Every structure is written in structure tokens, then in C-alpha cells.
Image (tube, helix red, strand yellow):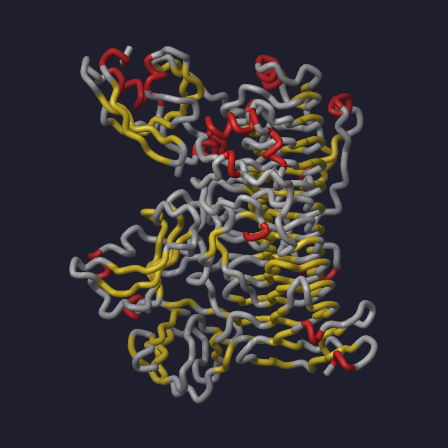
Amino acid sequence: MARKTPGAVTIKLYGGIYRLSSPIVFTPADSRKEGETLTLTNVENQKAIISGGVTLNNLKWKEYKNGVWQTGIEGDLIFDELIVNGQLQRMARYPNYSSSSRFLGGTASNATDKEHVAHWKSPEGGYVHALHRFEWGDFHYIIKGVNNEGELSLEGGWQNNRRMGMHPQYRFVENIFEELDTANEWFYDKITKVLYYFPPKGLNIKTAKFASPQITHLIEFKGTEANPVSNIDITGITFTQTLRTFMQNQEPLLRSDWTIYRGGAVFYNGAVHCRLADCTLHNLGGNAIFFNNFNRNCEVSGCLISSIGASAICFVGDPKAVRSPSFEYNEFVPLPQIDRTPGPLTNNYPADCKIYDNLIFDLGYVEKQCAGVELSMCQSIMVSHNTIYDVPRAGINVSEGTWGGHIIEYNDIFNTVKESGDHGSFNSWGRDRYWHPDKNILDSIVTTNFELTMLDVVKPIILRNNRMRCDHGWDIDLDDGSSNYLIYNNLCLNGGIKLREGVNRVVENNIMINNTFHPHVWFKNSNDVFRHNIVSTGYQPIGIKVWGKETDYNVFPDSVSLREAWSRGTDKHSVYGKLSFRAPQKGDFRLTDGSIAFSTGFNNFAMDSFGVISSKLKLLAKRVQFPTVIAPDNMNNNEIIDFMGARVKNLNTLGERSATGMDSMRGVLVVEVASGSGASVFLQANDVILSFNYKTINKLRDLLEARLSVIGTTTEVIIFRNQKEYKKKIEPGNIK
């Protein structure tokens, strides 16, 4: 009807809860002309709530036993989540939920053991949730039954694109009736249609309001490039109560760890000049906002997004728009078959959109492979002035280089990587069309076909004026093949900056508090630049033989760190000196007047412009904890020793773990192998020695003792290389 009315049209909702049985859909028929926007909003700031949940009426509660109550349920309802008085409850689970547990709200290695399973009468329909074996995300399975051996029969495990199996320890089960044993847990018996609930102390179960989500999407924009949905705004609305989507998260993204479910509470497909502003999105089981395939000039601004089962905001394009795509880490396109035309093949991807002034927190309460903002197969997305915290993985994640052009600025990102490993507050990778899983082959491709490295990331990605703190990884983590980045004026409060192999990265005028620069396994012709930066300790290189185009004019805290850099042939014009900040306890890490840092070309930058800018969101936002600056004399160097012609050391830093892909801090890292040595027969640089002569190797001392135990016979070494374990035999003549 609105499309037939000339001029701008506003639809206003009175305060109250609008419960949907299916999504509200905007089609091209609802599009408006420029300047004649259709707006869906509230009446005079009344709280209008759009919900995907149904209220549970006519409940006749009666006591069951051991603190549990029961009631029959009328009708055929989905019971995926239970909301009581507006608060999300928990499916009956083992082990019980604990807010103090780092992973998954509590885990137990015996959660799926036969001995534990034997106590369950009918586990069908239950779920197994687990971290990835290397903490790179998570896996989820539905229980189909129990086999003749008493083991669970499971379906699922497709939620991570690098399927290496569940973590042996970090796992739990839910939706099991026998595990209903503590307050706030519930279980629904689909056969008898009985809901069981363990109310917390003080709750009047007979007057409490119960609801259960029934749909996945609340708002959908359904258009195409040829016929888009245009000029529709949604403002001042609250969105809540949607179904979880972890079992629908199946589609692999390009060569990433990620799979994706293309959906969200607010779903855009084929939208142009549409805006979501000043809205609240909370208690949503899957993604909050999803931009799918073709979208242009859309905006999300001023929104409060919290308690989200998966990601907050996703931009994901069409793989068919990618030239020479591959979908798993170990896949590759043969060199002669690579399409050498730069950029996308079609326009079916999001571009020129804006994410501005949003408060985003408490994400991934179900799915751990998620982000505050996820960018995949898209171009020129501006992510500016957002505050993002309390997330299981990265605050902002850039999957692959397709097709660059993003501007990521003035964001405040902290309390990240809380339930995963080997990531950062900002995380990215490239793995573009030229990528090869074998590092030696990859090096040769970049050496002989350098032009391939820039065919997908055709526009530079700018990362500037952000404040980041990651206590379980890096503040800025550019992983495999991340290329064409300009990184400047960022305040890194704990994790430093990591650059793995890639090309054309310029990193300058950044401050790294209590950490440093982590260059990993660079290409010989990377063209990387690292200058005018402040580090708090010496660099932590791994597998670096050529230090890019320029590594110089940086500021070190002590002469030892600077001399170490000189010994590698870098930082000829760099300086060292005490780093005196204006008011670090208040977050002002600008250098005081007269600092020697200014002689290198470093310039102070503003410390009061990070994060959300609207007064309402500022009042609600948690504040980052500022670190106590650690003096350099508290830092310890790593010991490197000779082992059979190889230089080896303990694997004991996050950087080393990331560069090798190890699952934990264990083993001995091979730093360098001399040509023709005994070690060269079975070792390569960046290997991790896990076992030698049938003895487990955790530290250097273990390796030395294991070597001495070999008495003139053939023995065995187990190494970790290229994400896999290998066993190799060593002949007596090579043990010298």
C-alpha cells in the first residue's frame, strides 16, 4: 500500500510486543524513490518489540521431583530455547553451566563416554557441543541414538571448514532429561509434550511468563541486483527471540576455518540504500544481521546488539562471484588454470555499506566461530566507531582478500578470543586464488607469479585509529596470506601485531603496549613495511629470512632489543629509550614532550575517539581495562640450542603456536636446519618435534634426554608440519 502513496511514508508501531509466526518481508514492490523513504519505527519512543517467540499459555505446573516442575504443552511447538520473564534459560546439560569456565560454560572430557551415556534412557534429540581440536571454532552434533557398543551415534560436525575433530576435553552435552538437575535448566519431552523446568529460588512459577522462539528470521529484504529493495529504513525497534541455527551452519567459506548459515534476525538480500538505525537486537539464537550477496549503500548505525547466539553483523557474498575459488584449506587451483583477471566475476556481493556507532557485546553464546563484524566476499565496507567486547573469537574478522577496500577505524575492541585460540581482536587471512597449502610451493608461486597475489584484494584494506586489547591472542592478527593492508595509528593494549605471510602491508605509527611485532614466515618479496612504530620489547620473528621492503625508524624500550634488531640487519635508524606516556592509567598513551620517539617520525594520535559516539550507547558500554606498563627488564629471552645440526627452542609463545598451527604450548620448535646436517634428513624449519625415540617431547630437556637414550639403532621421530603429524624413521648414521 505504501508504494502507491507519493512522498515519504512512515509506519509507526505502538509500544508492545508483536509476535510473528513468519518474517515480515520487504520486496521490490515496497521500494521507494530517493528522498521518499519508507520508514518503520515506533510511536513517540514507545518500546515496540518484534519477537519470534510465542507465549506459553494455560500452563498447569505441578511439582515433579527434586526441585523440578512439569506441565503439559498444547499444540505443536518448537522447543529450542526457553525464555522465562525475558531471560534465556538453559537446556538440561552436562556438565552444568558455570560462568567461571572459560570454554562453553563448562566442559567435561567424559561427557560422551560410554560409562556416562549408559545413564541416559533416551538421548535421541540431545546435542553434543565441542571446541575444534585446535580451538579454531566449534562443532555441534545431534544425537541420533546409541549403537550396540554403547557409543553415541552422532550427526553433524560440519560447522568448521577444517574438520579435525572435537577437542578431547572441551565438550558438553545438552537436551538430556537425566541431566536436568539444577536451577534454570529445562527439558521438553516431544513424545509426551511435557515441559520440565527447574525454577530458581524466589521465582513464582505459576505467575512467571514463559515463551519459546519459533522462527529464525524476523525481517527479510528480498530483492536482486536487477530488481532491488530500495530506500527502506527501520528505526527504534527491538528485535528478540529467534531460533538457534548451529545445525544449519553448513556452507564453507573460501579456504577459511569458517562455515556460515546465510541468515539472521534481520536479513538483507538485494537491498539498496536501506538502513537499520537506533534499534535493539538481543536474545537472538543465530546471527543478528546478515547482508547476503548483492547489497549496496546500506547502513547499520546506533544499534545495541547483545546476547546473540552467533555473529552480530555479517557481510557474505556469492562464491560464484569469485574467480578460481577454493573452499577448503588444502584445496588449490593448478597454476595454469587460475583466472588472471583482477577482481570479482559478478556484482553479487555486498559493497559500499556502513557499520557505524554500534554497541556490540555478549556474542556467540552458542556458536563460537563468530564475530562482531564478519566480512567475506565483499568490498568497501566501512566499520567505524563501534564498541565490541565479550566475544568468543575476533571482534572483527576479514575472511580472505576478496575484494578489499574496507575501512576499519575508531573501533574499541576488547575481551576477545575468550573461547577460542590462535586469533586476535582483529583477525584476517588471505588464502586467495593463488594459495597453496604447501609453503615451499606457495613461496615459489609468489616468487615467480607475484601479480597473482593482488588479483582478489584489488583495493587496500585500511585499519586505522582503533584501540584493541586481546588477552588470549594478538590485538591485530593478519594470518595466512593477508595482503594489501594499510595499518596505522592503532593502540594495541596487550597482544601486539602479527603479520604472517602476505604482500604489500604497510604498518606504521602504531603503539604496542607490553608486546611487540610478530612477523611470521614472510615471502621473500613481500614488499612489507614496518616503520615509525613503538614496541615494548624486541621483535618475535618466526621463519623470517627477508625483512620486507623496510623495517626501520621504530622505537624500542631498551638497547638489548635494538641491538638484536641490528643483528638481523633491520632498524638501522631506529632508537631506544624510556617510553613515558602522558596518563596510561587513564588510557592516554600519547608520548610526553621531548620523547626520543619523535626523532624517528612517530606522531602522537588522538586517544579519545575510540568506540561508540552516541551518548546513549556510551553510557551503556563497558570500559576496557588499561594495562600496567611492564618494564623491559621483566622480559626473558628464549634459549636456542643446537640439535643434530638444527637450531631448536621450546615452543612457548602464542606466535610460535600460530605459525606452526599447534594445538597447545608443547613440543620443541625447529628454528633453522643446516644443509647437509643429520637433522636435514627429517626436519624442516617451523617443524615441531613432538616425540623422539618413542619419548614425548614437551621441552628442550626432554629432547636432549631422548637423544641420549638412542643406542645405535634406528629410531622414530614424530613431528608436526603443515597442520599434520608425521612419523619418520631415522637411521643410525643420521644420529650424530
For the C terminus, the image quarter is: top left
Seen from the viewer's position, the closer of residues 683 and 591 is: 683
Image vertical order of residue 449 relative to residue 329, above or below: above
For the N terminus, the image quarter is: bottom right
Residue 689 vs residue 339: left or right? left
Image vertical order of residue 184 relative to residue 514, above or below: below
Seen from the viewer's position, the closer of residues 482 and 477 is: 482
Is residue 687 visible in this depiction of the protein? yes
Residue at the far front: name it. Answer: 336
Q: Position of residue 584 (x, y in %)?
A: 68, 37
Q: Position of residue 367 (x, y in %)?
A: 47, 57
Image vertical order of residue 61 relative to residue 686, above or below: below
Image vertical order of residue 380 relative to residue 691, above or below: below
* Residue drawn at x 47%, y 79% as measured from the top left: 210
* Residue drawn at x 43%, y 22% as measured from the top left: 685
Residue 341 vs residue 1: left or right? left
Is residue 463 visible in this depiction of the protein? no
* Residue drawn at x 50%, y 74% as measured from the top left: 215
Residue 596 vs residue 307: left or right? right
Q: Position of residue 136 (x, y in %)?
A: 45, 45
Q: Position of residue 600 (x, y in %)?
A: 75, 22
